[in-house]
Image (tube, rainbow, N blue to C red):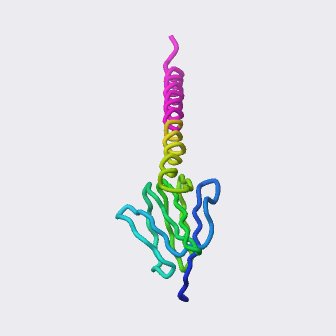
Amino acid sequence: MTMAAEMEVCLRLPTRVLYQGKARKLFAVAENGAFGMLPNHIDFVTSLVPSVLILTLEHGSEQIFGIDEGILVKKGHQVDIAIRRGVLGEDLDSLQDCVRRNFIEVDEDERVARSALSRLEAGMVRRFADLQRPKP
């Protein structure tokens, strides 16, 4: 493997690519703590926790992402990150608002949907139980 000044990073959501491009540094948080990565870092795989992911781009600017749980795979100079949910922020303050809007509101919608699904399942179980009872 050759020494590189940059790595190719691809940040994927289940339905689309959130970011794809070159980066000089990466900062993320795994289950066992925060870590930084440079292009010539050893290859590895780790699971990420909900946190802030920061990429330092080729020209020195930073991209800040709020991410949900996911997996990071580094092989050679390629870093693939698959996350459940993620948003790009302008700065930490706007990122917090964006995460609140996108993650917390979605969590509430998911809770309501799960509750409705549970009621449907309970109704189906009752109906099946009624079908199995002998008719008088």
Residue projecting furthest to the left: 32
> Measuring 50% from the left and 48% from the top, which residue is drawn there?
99
> Measuring 50% from the left and 55% from the top, which residue is drawn there?
66
> Measuring 55% from the left and 73% from the top, which residue is drawn there?
60
Can you say whether 74 is above or below 111 in the image? below
> Measuring 46% from the left and 58% from the top, which residue is drawn there?
52
Q: Position of residue 104 (x, y in %)?
A: 48, 42
Q: Quadrant of the N terminus?
A: bottom right
Q: Position of residue 7 (x, y in %)?
A: 56, 76
Identify the image quadrant of residue 57.
Answer: bottom right
Can you say whether 4 is above or below 136 in the image? below
**Magenta includes 49?**
no
Q: How many numbered circles are shown? A: 0
Extent of the magenta region: 110-136
Identify the image quadrant of residue 28.
Answer: bottom left
Residue projecting furthest to the right: 16
Of 116 and 19, nearer the camera is 19
Q: Position of residue 75 (x, y in %)?
A: 53, 77
Give the main secondary structure of the magenta stretch.
Answer: helix
Can you say whether 53 is above or below 79 in the image? above
**Magenta includes 118?**
yes
